[in-house]
Image (cartoon, rainbow, N blue to C red):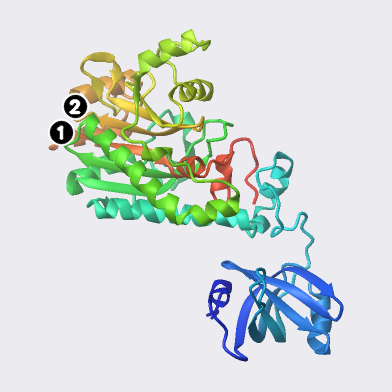
Amino acid sequence: MKKTYAVDLLGQTPSSAQVVEFYGWVKARRRHNHAIFLDVCDSTGTIQVVIDGANNTIFELARRIRQETAIKVVGILVETQRLYPPKEILAEKIEIIGVSTINVSPHPRSDINIFEEGLQENLLHRRHFYLRNEKIAAILKFRHLLTRAVHQWFGERGFIEIHAPVLTPTPLYEDRTAMAIQVHGQDVYLTQCVGFYLEQAVHALEKIYNMGPSFRAEESRSKRHLMEYWHIKAEMTFVSFEDLAATVEQFIHDVTEQCAISGAPLAKTIGTEICQDGLKIPFPRIDYKEAVDWLKINGSDIEFGKSLGSDEEALLSDRFGETPFWVVGIPRSIEPFPYMIDSSDPLRTRTADLIASRGFGELLGIAEKIHNLEMLDERLAEKGKAGDPRYEWLRELRQYGCVPHGGFGMGLERFIRWLLQIPHVRDTIPFHRVFGRRIDP
């Protein structure tokens, strides 16, 4: 088992004639006079390995080593008395662990612009190699930091994590928008949203959350949509709309604050800065109807009852500047059937969408859920689902001590994209699944 990493070697002060053993991959090779220099990297950094020409056996081996060959190095760790590299290994032994025989261009560990449009097809098609790129790896490390911060935030506030199923007979939206499969002859779907299951569990545990995969079949080629993505969902009992908004604002604030500190070195590696607009709570609000009226005055052809698209969100984002903002009171014609109708305006629901700053679009949504059977049946009929046996278990909940409840849902990848200020959501996940592109690899 590997015990010593590059970060360990670079962080220690070597003692006299200290022998070290290091496993890694050859990032680059240079020859100068009678010495060969190998940059050998692992997941934590890069260290220079020096092979003296006097050691003929390993010199000849090093001369033939290709990039990405995995090796074991045994040698003396020394200070270089230079700024870079500060330390190096004087090799005494080199062992080939894994050979490299495939040509990959540009080299995955080279300093390439991973967001350059001209490189995207190659980087996506050979994603299995380009995960080794330092910038892509930094995004994935940031993803790890963010998910850890999310779990910590919920845990510190008494939320219980629920592992909801991926296979479901009950789609949230229209059947055509869900990915259908057959299991033992039964037509089921890959989950679009675990909200139905959280509704049931929250009546046992009161404050719960889930972080897991969701799947969408409807076609959308925007920079913030994936067919397969990870969903942060939370549900609470005895909450109002204002409770939900305040909870989300504190969540965004606290997680952003933590990631701005722990993720700063990763953002620097990627070549960006972490967006801290989420610290500006409370976020401003605009009523959906007011937003539609303002957009029409400013050149949009949107009508009441239509979803805000990327162009409309971008216009509103310009209006609010460098802060997220709420669009409140989404029409019932847009929202799914479980969301509460606003008693002061029956055309709208007790919902809101949070739009990210700087033109990054919708980040998440909050909703009070219907808790009485009469309103649920009205909404089921409205959406063409009345009498559908697949939704009977949701009707039963409203007949068995159902209480006011609600929650929020956010795509993890959208959150990452906004915080890191990167162009496309596909760059935030190890292996992307986007609309219109073959699933490969």
Furthest residue in direction right, as rendered: 33
In the displayed structure, does residue 268 sit left or right of residue 302?
right
Q: x%, y% of residue 141?
A: 51, 57
Please state which amino acid type lies under the numbered disc 1: Gln
Give SS at disc 2. helix
Q: Residue 293, can we see it? A: yes
Q: Quadrant of residue 289?
A: top left
Farthest residue in the front direction? Answer: 81
Sequence order check: which comes first, mark 1 or mark 2? 2
Local secondary structure at mark 1: loop
- Please name the amino acid that badge 2 sits on: Leu
Quarter location, residue 330: top left
Question: How crowded is the residue under tag 2: few (<14 C-alpha within 10 Å), some, or many (20+)?
Answer: some
349 sits to left or right of 168: left
Judge whether 66 appears above or below 247 on screen: below
Q: x and y percent of residue 382 in the render? A: 32, 18
Q: Nearer the viewer, residue 311 or 103?
A: 311
Count how many numbered circles sit on residues in the image. 2
Dots 1, 2 in contact, CB < 8 A: yes
Give percent across and percent down for residue 408: 32, 37
Q: Residues within 10 Å of mark 1 (few under 14, many from 20)?
A: few
* Residue assigned mark 2: 373
Residue extending farthest top: 297
Q: Nearer the viewer, residue 433 or 88?
A: 88
On the image, the x and y values in percent for residue 326 come to 36, 27
Image-quadrant location for residue 389: top left
Residue at mark 1: 399
Residue 309, placed above or below residue 429: above
